[in-house]
Image (cartoon, helix red, strand yellow):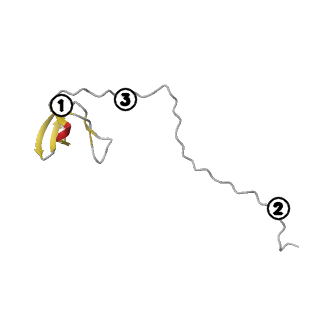
Amino acid sequence: MRLKEDVRSLFKPEVLYGKQGEEIKVISKQGAMCIVENTKGERFPVNISALTEDPIELKPEAVPDTTAVKKPIINRVPVSKKAAPINQKSLFDE
């Protein structure tokens, strides 16, 4: 069997369990979920709809755009400046 899509951890999305098109072996099946094992021996849960017997066309890797210079996004809140005090004579100064 093969994976139709990349499988990531639900709680840690940076952890990639399996890549699209990777060969896997079904260990157990219950309802719509399966426990599968990849070629490295790692086991992880996957929805049965993400599995297929057919060969998969791999999706092209995203090529980073190196031609444009990207500036960092800085979200600064503008601060209003206080108006200069007016030169007034106090009522109590004599």
For numbered disc 3, what is the local secondary structure? loop
The residue depicted at 12 percent of the width and 38 percent of the height is: 26
Q: Please name the residue that numbered disc 3 is placed on.
A: 62
Q: Residues within 10 Å of mark 1 (few under 14, many from 20)?
A: some
The furthest residue to the right: 94
89 on left or right of 12: right
x then y, percent, for residue 47: 19, 42
Which three-letter amino acid code belongs to the residue tagged 3?
Ala
The residue depicted at 16 percent of the width and 37 percent of the height is: 37
Frontmost of labels 1 and 3 is 3
Query: Along the line of sight, which residue is nearer the eye, 28 or 41?
Result: 28
The residue depicted at 57 percent of the width and 47 percent of the height is: 76
On residue 3, the disc is: none
On residue 23, the disc is: 1
For numbered disc 2, what is the local secondary structure? loop
The residue depicted at 85 percent of the width and 72 percent of the height is: 93
1 on left or right of 66: left
x then y, percent, for residue 94: 88, 73
Q: Residues within 10 Å of mark 2 (few under 14, many from 20)?
A: few
Which three-letter amino acid code belongs to the residue tagged 2?
Asn
x then y, percent, for residue 15: 29, 41
Mark 1–mark 3 CB contact (< 8 Å)? no
Q: Please name the residue that numbered disc 2 is placed on.
A: 87
| Gap between marks 1 and 2 measured at Cα | 81 Å
